[in-house]
Amino acid sequence: MQFSSGHYGHIRRTRHFMLPRAPLHTSRLCLRPYEPADATDFFRLLDGDRIRFQASFPDRLQAVRALADAHTALLNFANDWKTGRFYVFGIWHRATARYLGDICLMPQNRGQAEIGYYLAAAAEGHGYAREALEEVVRFGFGAVGSQRLLIRCYADNERGQAVARALGFQLETSPRRPLWFRNANAVGNICRFWLSRV
């Protein structure tokens, strides 16, 4: 499970054109922008793993407390896509059409973008995270035009760190943060991995 805080409103980047809401395909997966009909699957996965996701995705859980909230969230994702603020893909297994999780890319400032993702508990351990992440890295450096990509995860999330390293992300040994930052212990518990465009 990948960490992503969701507090990004102050660093959004303005795009001058809208990227097509087209799916991305890997050998086993279909990553596609959500449609309204996906709300039930989206909600069930979040609600079923609410305790497991609480530390890493509190904002999304707070926003999606009921099925009606899921419908609203998916509409917001579509609007964010139009503005270039946030690109969110659901992850489906191509052979079975089973919904597996979620992966997103958030453009930031100075050509940076952050990637966050989560999988259902039953979908972990099959290489799906690496497969989805590899495709979103291509999307970030290609269609979005990012120059650097960021992945954050907790220091004890060895699986998440292994996925980042397998795709060439490098650990930032001493994260930069303002001296006045009050939650220093929480920040120290988060690893930041970077990948630059070749």
Image (spheres, grey):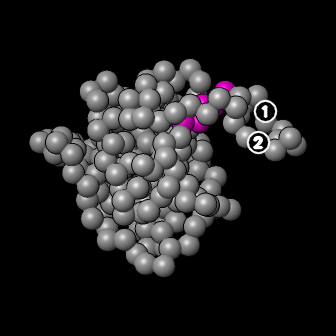
Inspect the magenta stretch and tell me whether residue 92 lies in it: no
**Left or right position of 14 against 38:** right
- Please name the residue shown 21% across and 51% down the image: 25
Of badges 2 and 1, nearer the viewer stands: 2
Q: Is residue 171 above or below residue 117?
A: above
Q: Residue furthest right?
A: 180
* Among numbered discs 2 and 1, the one appearing first in the sequence: 2
Label 2 Cα crowd, 10 Å radius (few <14 / some 14-19 / many 20+):
few
**Left or right position of 93 against 175:** left
Could you give the CA–CA distance between mark 2 and mark 1, rounded to whole angstroms? 9 Å
Instruction: Specify start and end residues of the magenta stretch as a single range.
Output: 189-193
Q: Position of residue 127 (x, y in %)?
A: 28, 30
* Residue 119 - label: none
- Please name the residue shown 29% across and 38% down the image: 131
Q: Provide the residue designation for mark 1.
A: 184
Q: Residue furthest left?
A: 95
Q: Disc 2 residue type?
A: Arg
Label 1 Cα crowd, 10 Å radius (few <14 / some 14-19 / many 20+):
few
Q: Is residue 148 above or below residue 68?
A: above
Q: Residue furthest bottom?
A: 16
**Left or right position of 32 against 94:** right
**Left or right position of 12 against 122:** right
Asked which secondary structure carries label 2, the reply is loop
* Residue 172 picture quarter: top right
Count the marks: 2
Q: Provide the residue designation for mark 2.
A: 177
Say whether marks 2 and 1 touch (CB < 8 Å): yes
Q: Residue furthest front?
A: 198
Q: Position of residue 99 (x, y in %)?
A: 27, 44
Q: Nearer the viewer, residue 3 or 112?
A: 112
- Please name the residue shown 60% across and 45% down the image: 5
